Image: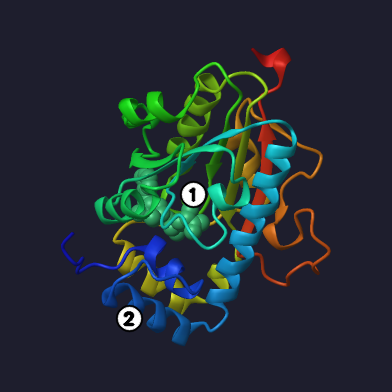
Amino acid sequence: MSEPQIPNSGRIIDHWLGGTHHFPVDAAAATEFADLYPGFPQVYRTLREFVGRAVRAVADEGVDQFLVLGAGIPTQGNVHEIVPRARVLYTDIDPTNIALGREFLSAVPDVDYAYCDAANPDTLDQEAAERILDPTARLGVVLVGLSISLDDRTLQNTLSALFDWAPPGSFLVADFDGEALASFPTILTKILDQAGQPLYLRDVERIRPILGSWQLTDDGICAVDVWRSPKPQPEHVFEYGCVLRKSYEMS
Ligand SMILES: C[S@@+](CC[C@H](N)C(=O)[O-])C[C@H]1O[C@@H](n2cnc3c(N)ncnc32)[C@H](O)[C@@H]1O
């Protein structure tokens, strides 16, 4: 695997979470961002903890297979570590993340890493999907850390395609970048420069119509910090999170 020269957000997060699957270019970017806002590592720790609680809640509903979009680096409390007996297919568009994930997951049964562009779920590597996922069984889809780079229409189409594809009784764990970043224009400009594309920050009212036919669970849409957690409501919301279901009546 050749060493990447461009940082990747998934590997930057791995660095902040104390992981080991990143490169010098990622570590340098992580340090630069944390110099601008020292709270970043904690923001992503909080997000990963939300993934843990939400995935555990979905597993407690009897779901034992997960498709993860924009997975980044699948360690440090990621889905297969939270639900060790589940079948898990991690996906991303970044070839280095896919190669790294395949390498360190190779010994883990029923867990793999494959290509899928979340902007078009039809691009999902079908061979990997058939090998890991049972198309007739309820599915947990995880779409976290990704919506910032998808415009409303694309995100709506993605959620709609996932809804059509998932068997009734399936769940979707999603997050949406909140308004907090807008309070830090210097950081936003830097992220924009690095992403080289528009970024989408959303409040709850803007999130609701994107969800389409997915039904919100009683927890609603809230700061990921407080989703089934006693933590205090944050002053600025970096990430909103929710768990959605495809009810049996909707099939
Ligand atoms: C902010 S990271 C989030 C990683 C992980 N979900 C987490 O919470 O730590 C975003 C990830 O999405 C990937 N990504 C960006 N655009 C994507 C797309 N259109 N489809 C799939 N993955 C994408 C990036 O390569 C990166 O690994």
What secondary structure is found at the residue carrying circle 2?
helix
What secondary structure is found at the residue carrying circle 1?
helix
Real-space CA distance between mark 1 and mark 2, rounded to the nearest whole angstrom: 24 Å
Circle 1 crowding by C-alpha within 10 Å: few under 14, some 14–19, many from 20? many
The kind of residue on which mark 2 rests is Ala
Q: Is residue 200 visible?
A: no
Residue 209: which quarter of the image?
Answer: top right
The image shows residue 126 at horizontal and vertical percentages of 33, 25
Residue occupying image coordinates x 79% and y 59%:
229
How many marks can you see? 2
The kind of residue on which mark 1 rests is Ser
Quarter of the image containing the N terminus? bottom left
Q: Give the vertical position of 38 relative to 53 (above or below).
A: below
The residue that mark 2 highlights is: 28
Residue occupying image coordinates x 28% and y 77%:
24
Q: Which disc, if any, is residue 147? A: 1
Residue occupying image coordinates x 59% and y 50%:
175
Residue occupying image coordinates x 45% and y 76%:
187
Residues at badges 1 and 2 in contact (C-beta under 8 Å)? no
Q: Earlier in the sequence, mark 1 or mark 2?
A: 2
Q: Is residue 62 left or right of residue 42?
A: right
